[in-house]
Image: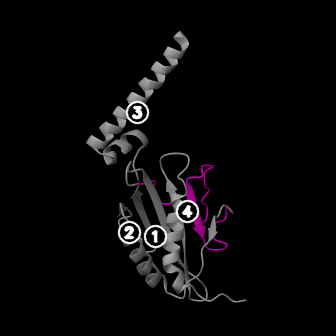
Amino acid sequence: MIIVQKIFTAIFGLAAFCALLILAAKLIGYDRVWPAIVGPADMGPVNFQSLKKSSSPNQYLACPSGLCQSGEVDLTAPSYALSTKELRTLLLQAIEQEEHIERVDGDLYPLKLRFIQRSSFFRFPDTARIEFFTNPDATSTLAIFSSSQIGEDDFGVNEARVKRWLDYLQPFEAPTSS
């Protein structure tokens, strides 16, 4: 009986601690709490040619054929019958429709974009990195790597984000040669 009481007390104490932590984060603001716990929300740029994904499932990579040398691509990005400038403009239109998203790359390199998108309730930050490329046939393509900073499993959020953006661009895909 004493062991059961100690287990119940420990569980109740842990639950109370978690509840207080969540309440404090809500009052202070998750945007201030997460950096203190896990570091800056922006996980920085990536080099798509040498990118190696971690073993965590909380990330998703769409990459044009032959670019991402690690072979860890989740989806092969299509080519588009657009210039890189036009493709960038259209993708930015898709991203503008998203909630809780901010651009963090400073627009230093026009063909490389980086965004932080936060979940609605806990404000968990995900970083999306995008790079645009011109193909030899004058079509364009892009690579997108979206990953969560916090947690082991993102419940498919990064995959859904990347696919939503690519779906927006789908009408502009270049015809494929058969």
Kindly identify the amino acid type of the residue bearing the numbered disc 1: Lys
Q: Which quadrant would residue 32 be assigned to in this image?
A: top left
| Identity of the residue furthest to the left in this view | 27
Q: Residue at label 3?
A: 18
Question: How far from the left and from the top, in percent, is residue 154?
Answer: 52, 52
Question: How far from the left and from the top, in percent, is residue 5?
Answer: 49, 15
For label 1, the SS is strand
Kindly identify the amino acid type of the residue bearing the numbered disc 2: Leu
For label 4, the SS is helix
Q: Main secondary structure of the magenta part?
A: loop
Q: Residue at label 4?
A: 159
The span shown in magenta is 42-70
In the image, residue 13 sits, relative to residue 73, either above or below, namely above
- Mark on residue 108? 2
For label 3, the SS is helix
Kindly identify the amino acid type of the residue bearing the numbered disc 4: Glu
The residue mark sitting in front, 2 or 3, is 3
- Mark on residue 41? none
Q: Which of the two residues, 16 or 138, is positioned nearer the viewer here?
A: 16
Q: Residue at label 1?
A: 112
User: What's the distance in space between the residues labelled 4 and 2, CA to CA?
Assistant: 27 Å
N-term-proximal mark, 3 vs 4: 3
Q: Residue at x 66, y 74 (%)?
A: 65
Mark 3–mark 1 CB contact (< 8 Å): no
For label 2, the SS is loop
